[in-house]
Image (tube, grey):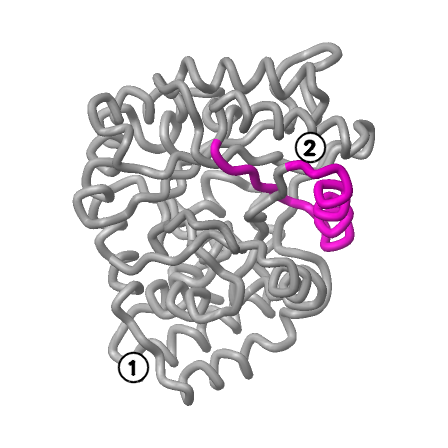
Amino acid sequence: MKYRRLGNSGLEVSILGLGTNAFGKRADQDASARIIHHAMDRGINFIDTANIYAGSESERIIGEALVGRRDKVVLATKAGLVNGEGPNTRGSSRYHLMQELERSLQRLKTDYVDLYQIHTFDPNTPLEETLRTLDDMVRAGKVRYIGASNYAAWELMKALSVSEAKGLNRYVSTQTSYSLADRTPEQELVPVCLDQGVGIIPYFPLAGGILTGKYSFDDRAPLKSRAQTDPSFSRFINDRTLTLGEEVSRVAEENGCTPSTLSLAWLMEQPAVSTVIVGATRTEQLDENLKSVELSPSEQVLNKLDEISGSFRYGKPFATYRLS
């Protein structure tokens, strides 16, 4: 396994991380535990979850699986998106964050989180309130590092400026949709992260499966695919994305690898990327993704991928999660 520093922090994370959105939904507790242990045995130390994944089941399952092995992983979770009905069940107010952190710690069976992330920017809470709350969590020993997620470049830069002005702990990382099918972060977010020493953690690195080669013009919703199980995902399946998927598959075939491993390896070569989180519902999927760690695409291959995906720098992001 290869490791990189998370942004400018001293924390080292595996270049391939484990995403756990499927735990408690498409992967039951036993399957999820097998995947976690399989990942750890192969050097993956970064595990990413959130308080709302599978109705909080993801955190509970991870907590059970890590009993006796908690100190072997960098455990990351998030809060800020809607997690209940009524007031104070969303956002990044002191009230909500402190409540959610305590609940996450109980489910994860730990007394600290290595990376606590704000799931999305909250336009209704002053940034100083959010950042002071996070700073208090770090000082209390319940959080070690803090990160953002789904922040626009200007929102991230503003948060970093507030932290600097007030002498508060600053974000060391940010999560964003980033892949060959979504290169919009390269316009503003990547330059900010490079300048400020913030590590990027891409999610949807395979564009929900579009970059795996499973979708085609002949079969736009293969059996058990995301497009079949989640009809709303069909909005991403169009001539433009299908063409990209076919072109990536062609380049991968020419280089003796799968489109999935090539797409992940391309992301790992991008500046500011610290770790790429990929989900799995079977250990076999994880093994396939692990091949990307040892794959070193040539400059010619990287240039070809850059060429065929260049238009995806522009337009709307593939995905983003915001408070309404």
| Depicted 44 relative to depicted 72: above or below | below
The quarter holding residue 45 reads top left
The segment highlighted magenta reads: 144-168
- The residue tagged with tag 1: helix, strand or loop? loop
Foreground: 55 or 15?
Answer: 15
Foreground: 19 or 111?
Answer: 111
Q: Is 20 in the magenta?
A: no
Q: Which residue is mark 2?
A: 131
Q: Which quadrant would the N terminus be assigned to in this image?
A: bottom left
Q: Residue at x 62, y 59 (%)?
A: 193
Disc 2 to disc 1: CB gap under 8 Å: no
Foreground: disc 2 or disc 1: 2
Coordinates of residue 315 in the picture (x, y in percent): 73, 64
Q: Residue at x 62, y 55 (%)?
A: 318
Coordinates of residue 18 in the picture (x, y in percent): 35, 44
Q: Residues within 10 Å of mark 1 (few under 14, many from 20)?
A: some
The quarter holding residue 209 reads bottom left
Foreground: 19 or 113?
Answer: 113
Which label sits on residue 213? none
